[in-house]
Image (cartoon, grey):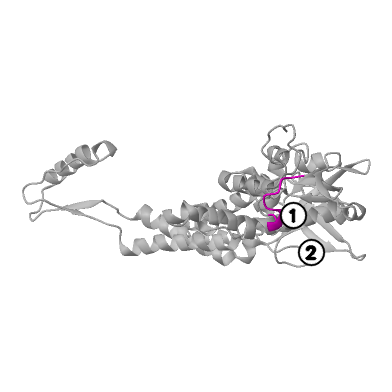
Amino acid sequence: MKWWKGVLGLAKDGGEAGQKDHAWTPETGRAAFHDRDNFVTNRVTLADYTAGTANPLGLSATFACVGLIAGTVASLSPSIYRRVNGVRVEDREHPLFWMLRFDPNADDTDYDFWEFIAASIELQGNAYADKRRNGGRLTSLIPVSPMGMTVRRTRKGSREYEWVDEGGNRQVRREDDILHIRGFGGDRLKGCSTLATCARIFAGAVHTDLAADKVFANGVRPSGVLSLDDKLTPEQRSYLETILQEKFVGAMNAGRPMVLDGGVKWHALSLAPEDAELLESRKFSGEEICRIFGVPPAMVGYGDKASNWGTGKEVDVLGFIKFTLRKRLRRIERALMKQLLTRQERMQGVTIEFNLEGLLRGDSDGRSKFYQLMTMIGAMTINEVRALENMPPVEGGEVPRMQMQNVPIPRAGQEEQ
């Protein structure tokens, strides 16, 4: 839970969040002091208070969408590339290569770091990392929680960042010492918080979930009833309930035939229409959250079987990569290039990019067709294909080849000279 606390600001006090009203909001995550009066006058129960301060990340749709996006971004750690003779190659000698690709700091793996960064952007609209240098050389990136972060413009026009760290110490950094990736919306200082901007949607989903929980927790939901024309004595009622519990309750007794006599009738109960509407409301709330994050509902468990599996799933995955993931990766790439590379390096063709090929490797049929086409037209060699599949090169495999069936008619049938 510590990982999410850093994103939601639940791990520490102080900073901008600690100075505001303590009512729960996406910016504070705390209770209001005036709530004390409600407890004293008994106008609110502990259950009601807990329901009112529920965390949007506790919604299954929110957790699944953010986890999917952040986890996918983290699995595609960026790397440094340089143009050599017009060909883009990975620059393993660049000082930033190891830090971005494998080891951003002493505590985090590359996956932990980029997952935190991506989740911060999705939930709070901003991601921050403290640049640590040794002898003027950038050596590590320390992630900073977006909660309580103050960004202001100095008189000289540059940005200044202020926050309270985990030890309760006030930290102030210049813009050259902070990696700041802004999300969608907001202004030139900060991106807009998804939790704050769409607070009404999240609040509605939370209350729908809580209402459903109360209905099914407090309501009586028997699978059926036994009806008789005559009134039962207390002894008869107790005996009948005991027989039902012993013979027909539990997985081992499922499907066991029931013998009724004496005018006893069994009436099976189905889900009430109002309860079915409540379940549909919960499903609609989940789909609304999916729309906020741009995730196809089927990818996080919403929708029917036809949309969750088969050809529909492949379309969802491709749409997710093209229209949801790609723009997020491009936003991160541009921020990294602008804030970590010098202008001279960018002019020389040095880039920082995520490699999406790993996401497409699961489609073996599509991959094989792509390789076949690229080798047929001479765009790729056999050894280039083998390198992508982590296979050793073969002798003669570096020569481009192409089929010769589409040749001019006068040359048809002529042998190669």
Residue 192 magenta-drawn?
no
Q: What's drawn in magenta, residue-wise?
A: 407-417
Q: Residue at x 60, y 49 (%)?
A: 67
Residue kind at label 1, given as amino acid type: Ile
- Secondary structure beneath dot 1 equals helix
Q: Is residue 231 above or below residue 1?
A: below
**Circle 2 crowding by C-alpha within 10 Å: few under 14, some 14–19, many from 20:** some
Give the left or right position of residue 145, taking residue 369 as reference: right
Q: Is residue 256 above or below residue 412?
A: above
**Residue at the spot of label 1:** 332
- Secondary structure beneath dot 2 equals loop
Q: Residue at x 60, y 65 (%)?
A: 198
Find residue 313 and report its horizontal and vertical position in percent: 51, 53
Residue 9 showing in the rendered view: no
Give the number of the disc on residue 189. 2
Q: Residue at x 57, y 53 (%)?
A: 317
Q: Residue at x 70, y 61 (%)?
A: 20
Residue kind at label 2, given as amino acid type: Leu
